[in-house]
Amino acid sequence: MRLKVYLDLVRFEHTLFALPFAYGGMLLAAGKWPGWRIFLLVTLAMVGARTMAMALNRLIDWRIDALNPRTQNRHLPQGLVRPKAVLALAGVGFSLLLYAGLSLNPLTARLLPVAVVFLTLYSYTKRFTWLCHYVLGLTIGAAAAGGWIAVTGSFAPTAYWLWAGVGLWIAGFDILYATQDYAFDRAFGLKSIPARFGLAKALQIARLNHALAWASLLMAGVSYGTGPWYYLGLGLVGGLLVYEHRLVSPQDLSKVELAFFQANVGVSLGMFLFILLDLMA
């Protein structure tokens, strides 16, 4: 029972947003299967980063969560876990990330402090800037570039385009997700694009983010020289993004959760699958 509580707290299913792109960056960098060692270390780094970030987010925000009707049933507000236990869980995640980063190559080791700062910083940003969605995008989007760096030990134009594409995609759907807390954020002085600009404008900004994300992923393919399977996958991604935005309007936010999880998991898993098919062709 205790293990289930901790798994629910970390929300491992949300790893499906970034992990497939980390694998995609890894495969593109290698141009083939990179070997079990790199694959396992990339997986370990992603699981560790996700565990650390989510545990810290729940710990840092738990008093806010207790006030918000949407989040007051989370584990810490309900007393299902103790703050010290959540902090220990964050420590476990940090240890996994540290081990993987030090084991991969010198560049991943040097970038570890930067990763830890951003994984920690995000949870505080909504207290002082409505750009918090872009801090999240910058942080999680690094997974795609991280997969590339894990193989090559260096940056490259394709890695930057992947980072931009995933980061803008994450920022866009985080704006959509934040529409659920529009009234609460305004009432309690929390910063977000919906709270700052209103629901209609926020949805427009989210659409713009996703258009730019799609264009960035297109440029990643062009810079790499991918084949037709990659662009077929990109077409699928474009369709899913359009579908996601058709589900949500300022007058009806009831399908935000559907748009947030199902459509976006389809984006990440679909893109990974078509990268794999492209390299196998």
Image (cartoon, grey):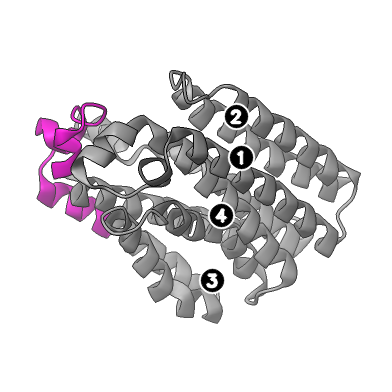
Q: CA distance from mark 2 to mark 3?
A: 38 Å
Decide which of tag 1 and tag 4 comes sooner along the chain.
Answer: 4
Disc 3 residue crowd, few under 14, some 14–19, many 20+, Cα 10 Å: many
The disc label shown at residue 78, or none: none
Q: Say whether disc 2 or disc 3 marks the residue closer to the N-terminus.
A: 3
Q: Amino acid at mark 4?
A: Gly
Mark number displayed over residue 245:
2
Task: List x then y, in percent, for residue 94.
Answer: 32, 62
Q: Is residue 80 magenta?
A: yes
For badge 2, the amino acid type reads His
The residue under label 3 is 104
**Residue 207 numbered mark, or none:** 1
Query: Secondary structure beneath disc 2?
Result: helix
Could you give the CA–CA distance between mark 3 and mark 4, rounded to whole angstroms? Answer: 23 Å
Q: Which residue is mark 4?
A: 167
Q: Amino acid at mark 1?
A: Arg
Crowd around label 4: few <14 · some 14–19 · many ≥20 (10 Å): many
